[in-house]
Image (cartoon, helix red, strand yellow):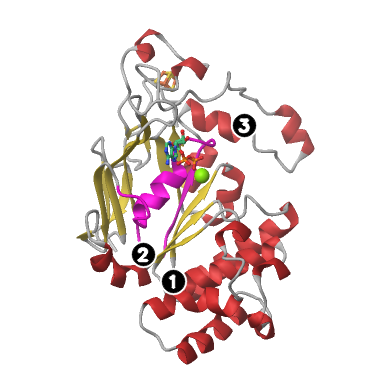
Amino acid sequence: MTTTTTATSGAATSTTSTPLLSVRDLTMTFPGRRSRSVPVRAVDGIGFDVAAGETLGLVGESGCGKSTTGRMIVRLLEPTAGSVSYDGRDITHLSQRQLKPLRRDLQMVFQDPHSSLNPRQTVARIISDPLMVQGSSAADARKRAVELMDLVGLIPEHIDRYPHEFSGGQAQRIGIARSLATSPRLVVADEPVSALDVSVQAQIVNLMERLQRELGLAYLFIAHDLSVVKRVCDRVAVMYLGRIVEIGVKERVYAAPAHPYTRALLSAVPLPDPAAERARERITLLGDPPSPAAPPPGCTFHPRCPKAQEICRTEAPLLRIASPGEARQVACHFPEAA
Ligand SMILES: Nc1ncnc2c1ncn2[C@@H]1O[C@H](COP(=O)(O)OP(=O)(O)O)[C@@H](O)[C@H]1O
Ligand code: SF4
Ligand SMILES: [Mg+2]
């Protein structure tokens, strides 16, 4: 595949010529929870591509718009503006009926496995459901559910049990099996390990990696923690207050983060070597992220940024290529030299 670079302000990507998923200027404005007249711009014009078989990590603190982005992509939410294209086709405004065949290809795994599985349904029913919706017979769907349980490392004989009879890690395996039932090409995984014990997280990440290799899946892998996506992603996009502030190939972003926010997030990830941990620079962010109902003017990160200068208070930096010859893009007036 040929690789090209897109450098417009709305599209933040190193792309292949035929991306599986293309998101452009995607925006979600919710009516305010406290006052409906004060809208909440949860996602503010973001753009990126995901190639077939690729994993894009989407990271940022709680409330920055990650889940809203994921839900717009699988059309659980209707975007306020912008577009989502799948395999070259604009799917942003398709009706539920038009979306039905696409639901095979585009699936989602949720953060809390137990609350995303219907407690009154058996595992057989939960995993079979997406297949029955697509027209499979009950017998075929059950046969496939048995195969899927085996694929995700569950005991197929447990197929008639209920979700509460499984641990958190096992329940997430059920959620993953359900997402794979229709043989999708893209899975949006919204913090799939955040609700699990640390000891179980690695097992689920391993499982997702294995499934990707075996099935050729692409993932949009959402996490608030940069250390979780480091293992799985090819590229990473960092979000802050509804916008992408840095996006690039994993190796470059982790080795030489260019945006002060990425640097701060990375400096909070513990290092395995205690000496390196003691020696490294820690960047402490001031305060909590501002509300998307009242974003600061200029660069929205400026009230918390250790490098902020006068221009940052008035002019919003565009997302653009920071160093010549590199596909990485950064939204900062003073990006760190790579
Ligand atoms: N249905 C909604 N109505 C109003 N505000 C919402 C709604 N859903 C999310 N938000 C707000 O949008 C912002 C982004 O939320 P979300 O996408 O869940 O962030 P993340 O997944 O990164 O934690 C937050 O400020 C959140 O409070
Ligand atoms: S534009 Fe200014 S405030 Fe924003 S991240 Fe860069 S240096 Fe910090
Ligand atoms: Mg979320």
Q: Does residue 52 belong to the magenta stretch? A: yes
Where is mark 2, residue-wise? 52
Q: Are marks 2 and 1 in contact (CB under 8 Å)?
A: yes
Local crowd size for mark 2, using a 10 Å CA cut-off: few (<14), some (14–19), many (≥20): some
Q: Is residue 14 magenta?
A: no
Q: CA distance from mark 2 to mark 1?
A: 8 Å
In the displayed structure, 302 sits above or below 321; it is above
Residue 169 seen by the camera: yes
The foreground one among 148 and 279 is 148
Where does residue 332 sit, x and y in percent of width and height?
Answer: 38, 25
In the picture, the quarter occupied by the C terminus is: top left
Instruction: Tell me which corner region of the image, top left, top right, bottom left or bottom right, holds residue 74.
Output: bottom left
The residue tagged 1 is: 216
Q: Which residue is mark 3?
A: 267
Disc tally is 3
Examine the rendered structure and indicate whether residue 61 appears above or below residue 3: above
Q: Residues within 10 Å of mark 3 (few under 14, many from 20)?
A: some
Q: Which residues are magenta?
A: 50-78
SS at badge 1: loop
- Tell me: 100 left or right of 149: left
Looking at the image, which residue is at 67% across and 58% down? 202
User: Visible in this render: residue 182?
Assistant: no
Sequence-wise first label, 3 or 2: 2
Identified by mark 3, the residue type is Ser
**Residue plotted at (34% across, 55% down):** 75
